[in-house]
Amino acid sequence: MIGALWWLLEHWWLVLGIAVVAAAWRIGGWRLALAVVTLGLGWGVYAKGRRHGRDEIERRDQARRDQLKERYDEIADRPLDPGDAYGRLHDRARDE
């Protein structure tokens, strides 16, 4: 009994949808009920596609951020003055 109630709470949208379809059937017959079901299915497909699109965008953004982080870490790990470049430039300036 508690399991069935828990399932109903988890699937509240399904219970609400059945109630709306039943009310549409009562008010306008099978045609209105069919229209409500069609609209509900269309909304469900739209919501699922939108959620999938957002997840895909987030996945791509995360991959891009990871690549940038790796690149920045690579740059940060380089020596600040490779091969004493500053000293060589300073010596050249004094020689001229």
Image (cartoon, rainbow, N blue to C red):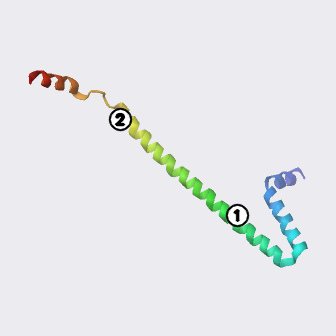
Q: Secondary structure at mark 1?
A: helix
Lower sequence index among marks 1 and 2: 1
Amino acid at dot 1? Gly
Give the quarter of the image for residue 34: bottom right
Identified at 65% across, 60% down, the residue is 48
Looking at the image, which residue is at 12% across and 21% down? 94
Tag 1 near tag 2, CB within 8 Å:
no
Q: Residue at x 79, y 58 (%)?
A: 13
Q: Looking at the image, is 28 positioned above or below residue 53?
A: below
Residue beneath label 2, please?
75
Question: Horizontal placement of 12 versus 55: left or right?
Answer: right
Where residue 6 sits: x, y (%)? 84, 51
Secondary structure under the numbered disc 2 in the rendered image:
helix
Q: Is residue 30 left or right of residue 93?
A: right
Q: Please determine whether, in this image, residue 29 is positioned above or below residue 2.
A: below
Q: Quadrant of residue 39?
A: bottom right
Residue 19 x, y percent position in the rendering:
86, 64
Q: Position of residue 2 (x, y in %)?
A: 88, 50
Q: Quick one: which residue is furthest to the left in this view?
A: 96
With respect to residue 75, does 39 lie above or below? below
In front of the other: 42 or 14: 42
**Are there few (<14), some (14-19), or many (20+) residues within 10 Å of tag 1?**
few
Q: Nearer the viewer, residue 3 or 22?
A: 22
Quarter the C terminus occupies: top left
Relative to 87, does residue 28 appear above or below in the rendering?
below
Question: On the image, which quarter does residue 37 sit in?
Answer: bottom right
Q: x and y percent of residue 59 in the render? A: 53, 50
Q: Which disc is residue 44 wearing?
A: 1
Front in this rendered view, residue 1 or 37 = 37
Which residue is at 39% across, 40% downward? 71
Distance CA(mark 1)–CA(mark 2): 47 Å
